Amino acid sequence: MRETAGDPKTCYKEQTGAVSGIRKILGVIGKILFVLLGAGAVFIFRSVAWVLKTWSDLSMEEIVFHLNMPLEGTNSGMIRDFAIYCVLPAAAVAVIFIVLLLVLRKRRKPRRVFLSVVPGVSVAAIAFSLVHIWTTLDVSAYVKNQNTYSSFIDDNYVDPASVSITFPEQKRNLIYIYLESMENTYADQTSGGAFEQNVIPELTEISLNNENFSGEEAVLNGGVSLTGTTWTMGAMFAQTSGLPLLIPIEKNSMNTQENFFPGITTLGDVLEDAGYRQELVIGSDAVFGGRQLYFEQHGNYEIYDYNYSKSNGEIPEDYYVWWGYEDQRLFENAKKRLNELADSEQPFNLTMLTVDTHFEDGYVCPLCTGEYGDDQYSNVMACSSRQVAEFIQWIQEQPFYENTTIIVSGDHLTMDVDYCENVSDDYERKVYTAYINAPVTPETDVYREYSTFDAFPTTLASLGCSIQGDRLGLGVNLFSEEQTLIEQYGVEQSEQGLAQKSRLMEELIASINKADVSSINYEAAEQTLSLQVENIQWDQEVSGIKCEVWIENNEQDVRTYTGTMKNAGEYQVVIPLEDFEYKTGQYCVDTYLLLNDNGYELIKSDRMEVNPTATAVPESEIAGSSPEVYIDPYDYQTGRFLVQVNNVFAENIVAVNCAVWAEEDQSDLKWFELAGNGANNYSTEIYAVDFGFKTADYNVHVYMIDSSGNMILLGAGQVNVS
């Protein structure tokens, strides 16, 4: 017998088929999630291990700074190592799981065990990894500090813009050499290092024979790298501004900024104002870490980096080693730059940054002699020590040296995880420091305890500058007797104060992203509120402006208004008071930027007391009119009262309205329009139901509105509703 559409057997088959199809879809989704969970667990586990293996003394501040930085300029070898260590194993696990799912498809028991065990192991691996990195980085302390305000920075910061800095009549040149990951630790213990064998003998001799502020002690001394200074950009920022580089994550897209801390005055700014020509010479991409932006914005430095050398024939177009090009080429390029600068009539500042000693294990160049056998990092450090010494000797042989100060400074402690693992915890690791050919000597012979913040004013002092108060930023002129932060508070208290939130830093950070919002303007004639937004500088593209408006104590009635673009980057927002029935009160206006990623950012909250109702004017000002206002008593049977205006003869009349309220604060104010009868008379009925039959004396104000938007009070009175 043939099955029909209404046959129960056919319906059953259709329903069973539908359920089976849904189960298959869910099964496929479940398998995809299963594979992703396993591969994700491997990726997270390996990533945490790689991060902690690759960087020593990693801080949350450094992670926060770099999270939103561009990959442009990053060492390709590091990206490759991450891919090999983390991405490839995760991909391999995903493939293996897919194969096993296919192989075990018809073997129920092994398949069931496989599907049961893997999710548990994966979740455990993810949990372990997250707890491990959370504990290692002490994220709890970081979060707590980010929610705790301290006045440490605010109390100790000296704004360089407010300090008198006097240069000598003949301005001295400056050569500032940042040495990547160079610290005193690598010297022998007799010289003040921590190693048994000195791997930087030339640099040790340079520091001991010049100034490192160790007083009468013939040992190495250097700056402590405090919070916010422990990576290259943080270090360069600290040594030239006297501030830690602490930026919250949402304000950290420095590659998209138009300004890098525009509200501060730095070493570059001071030297630019003094007429210096300034150059930054590095063998990597200056964009990385925001270096190009910072040095261009603060001092108008000319940038000579890897990209410049490639574009101008200093290296082949396809040349790339380590982070760009090696230090051997860097020193040769710096010599060329110095000869050009010396030929100009301006005093100059050449700042440079080495790179061969970057972690992990550094870059072995043709000049490395391998005297430390298989210890690659020591070989690289020794090679760097020789190259720096030879470069300084070359400078000292040049005619411009007599009027030139040389500063050699490590940027931060090494990030190589195992190079200093045998160093005693009692040894205080400091960055390498040497001031060469400075025209000034320390006022005291004591061994100074200082941080890299102190480099800012000390650099200017080493150029023969006189600094009012001997303090700039958070730094102190070490040639003076002024106490440093560490000498006043110690390292631990200084670290704690820097790690916590600062009102001053928030103000400086706010100047990174900024927009000028005018105060609220009340236009009585138009009965509107308005404001303007201009000079927008933001780390994301701005697509518009919106304002949220409400009357205080009435937050449930919030209205939103969008801005009208007047010129490029300039907006006006107009808020008609008619939308709020012309109520008197505190108008609250929150202004937001609308961002292209569909997000928004609050840029200003403002408040204004507004009384939209006009004051009474003499009847003579209402041309040809002698208005008479009548308010009839309340009729409890009909629940209403009548408001009437007669003899309104003004030619420019637009409307006649009345405001009615019972509450003293006008929170129940309502507006009603009076209808005209064609004979210059207007009237309306007011129903008590509109006010919830509230028993009270109702206030009634009647207004004429003319063609200019003026509200003219015609009369007022009260009605008792009971």
Image (tube, rainbow, N blue to C red):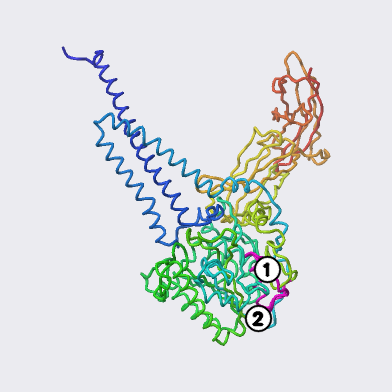
**How far separated are the C-alphas under marks 2 and 1?**
27 Å
Q: Position of residue 573 (x, y in %)?
A: 63, 46
What residue sits 39% from the left and 68% below the top? 320
Q: Amino acid at mark 2?
A: Lys
Q: Which residue is mark 1?
A: 448
What residue sits 76% from the left and 37% below the top? 613
Is residue 462 inside the magenta stretch? yes
- The dot on residue 171 is 2
| Side of 681 relative to 84 (left or right) | right
| Nearer-the-camera pick, 631 or 265 | 265
What residue sits 31% from the left and 30% below the top? 112
What residue sits 43% from the left and 62% below the top? 75
Above or below 541: residue 552 = above
Q: Position of residue 323 (x, y in %)?
A: 43, 66
Above or below 122: residue 183 = below
Disc 1 crowd, CA 10 A, few/some/many (<14, 14-19, 20+): many
The magenta-colored residue range is 438-467
| Nearer-the-camera pick, 509 or 147 | 147
Q: Position of residue 672 (x, y in %)?
A: 70, 29
Is residue 501 inside the magenta stretch? no
